[in-house]
Amino acid sequence: MSDSYEEGPTPTERLYAIVEQGLCIGCGLCQSVAGKDCVRVTKTSNGYLTPLVEGELDHETVDRIYAVCPGTRVEGLPERLVEPDTHRDNVWGPWRRMARAWAGDPGVRFEGSTGGVLTALGNYLLKSNRVEFILHVKTSASEPSFGDRTLSFTEVEVIEAAGSRYGPAAPLIDIDEVLGRDQPFAFIGKPCDISALRNYAKQDERVDKLVKYWLTLVCGGYGTPQGTIEFFKRMGFNPDDVTGLRYRGRGCPGPTRVETADKVEEFHYIDYWGEDETTWTLPFRCKICPDAIGEAADIAAADTWIGGSPTREGSEDDPGTNAIIARTATGEELVAAAAADGALEIEYDIVPDIVSTYQPHQVNKKYAAWARHQGLADAGRIVPQIERLRIEELSRELVESTIEYQREGTRKRVEIGKASEPTPAIWKPSSTC
Ligand SMILES: Cc1cc2nc3c(=O)[nH]c(=O)nc-3n(C[C@H](O)[C@H](O)[C@H](O)COP(=O)(O)OP(=O)(O)OC[C@H]3O[C@@H](n4cnc5c(N)ncnc54)[C@H](O)[C@@H]3O)c2cc1C
Ligand code: SF4
Ligand code: SF4
């Protein structure tokens, strides 16, 4: 142990500070870094997936976790992947091609969350033998509202995992073992999962050798466990009776389908999320997210609803259209090859200002992120280390009063406990959530 730690918090306290300060998104990576006998990422007392220390944790391991955890470090695309002729948009980051698109196979388009682009790309990567499997997330076998990390080796398996999982999911929980397979693969995850794996690439050279394609979704944040419980209750379900939850897909957005042993009911996306951004219930980490647009991925896929949310009437027969952002030469080549093969249907090319009309909440969040991080610093909280995401530069475009409003808002959240989570403890059905 280094001398500087002798008087300070214990290794466990340092790891738990990430959770307690609302920065853990439950990606699972710390379990891989520390080893599952030492740290287990599991459902804990607040209802989220968080680390639970079960063995001897030391400071060196916690240092390694702080260097890779997406709660403490978030970086944009590695410079070596930004070709000289890449466009650089201040809000949307590096991009080589933006387009409206959907899966060429109507069945995949239907199953997908939006237009099935990520599923279609996963299938194309397998079919063309570019990778051996896809690491991504499917409906959890044990927690109906969660996602489980899965490896898909066949197109059927990729399609089974289609659709957004809005609950907690830990795709990197056993990344050490996944890399141990020594097979090339593609990773599909949320932008924060992508950040985590990019960070980990600096500690484990197998990542850059084996992860051939990095695919992500543009992400407004995930649903809190408490918010999902409230949704079940609002819709007349006892949360303990729910055996299945499909958030969306099978149309765009498609029905939110709730199952119990004796009934199945379908609701609208708006019943779960509400009419617009102001009604979204999100974890604190999502509110200060400096990269919810997947800057470190080869390709990011998004929705195309003008204003960021669907309407009940407008979405009845919507077959789904994605906006895709190809950021790297690898991503651009994959889009072109998948389109030539018929796996993808490109409608037409677009530009950042058009994507902003689909994603006004992402534009607002990107501008606000730096001020929110300053609010964390004012409150003496952990401030995520940020590189190549332009958040300070963007905040300089704001008037001083807006920066202060955002900064003060975060300070207030910390003060009133809205940016805090309990110390992780074993989940019990009678726990808080
Ligand atoms: C938490 C969350 C928030 C989102 N917020 C926005 C938003 O603000 N704006 C927007 O445009 N789009 C948002 N989306 C993305 C949108 O819902 C679609 O996922 C995206 O448009 C891709 O559509 P698709 O039809 O290509 O996806 P599909 O073809 O259905 O493929 C989805 C892929 O994502 C993977 N996946 C699903 N859920 C998770 C998860 N929780 N963690 C890791 N991987 C997962 C699946 O394994 C699958 O491979 C969000 C998605 C999620 C999961
Ligand atoms: S965000 Fe991931 S790496 Fe960080 S503490 Fe949570 S589970 Fe661990
Ligand atoms: S908003 Fe950011 S932190 Fe939250 S789930 Fe999305 S990418 Fe992760």
Image: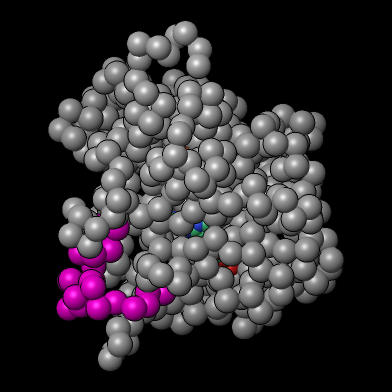
Q: Residue 354: horizontal and vertical position, in percent?
A: 55, 51
Camera sees residue 74: no
Q: Identify whether 173 is placed above or below 370.
A: below
Q: Nearer the viewer, residue 4 or 93?
A: 4
Q: Is residue 26 left or right of residue 284?
A: right
Taking the spot 66% from the left edge, 52% from the top edge, the residue there is: 177
Q: Please state if 88 lies on the left or on the right of 396 as rendered.
A: right
Q: Position of residue 35 (x, y in %)?
A: 55, 43
Q: Residue at x 48, y 41 (%)?
A: 38
Direction top: furthest residue: 3
Q: Residue at x 70, y 76 (%)?
A: 155
Q: Nearer the viewer, residue 135 or 97?
A: 135
Q: Nearer the viewer, residue 425 or 329?
A: 425
Q: Quadrant of residue 202?
A: top right
* 342 magenta-colored: no
Color style of the picture = one colour
How many numbered tags mark residues here? 0
Using residue 402 as the reference point, say whether residue 150 is left or right of it: right
The segment highlighted magenta reads 225-246
As displayed, is residue 185 above or below residue 328?
below
Q: Quadrant of residue 365?
A: top left
Residue 239 highlighted magenta (yes or no): yes
**Residue 327, position as x, y percentages in the image:** 69, 44
| Residue 216 percent across, percent down from the top left | 59, 53
Which residue is found at the position 36% from the left and 55% from the top? 43
Work out which quarter of the rendered image holds the C terminus and state it.
Answer: bottom left
Residue 266 sits in which quadrant?
A: bottom left
Is residue 22 visible in the rendered image? The answer is yes
Front one among 401 and 135: 135
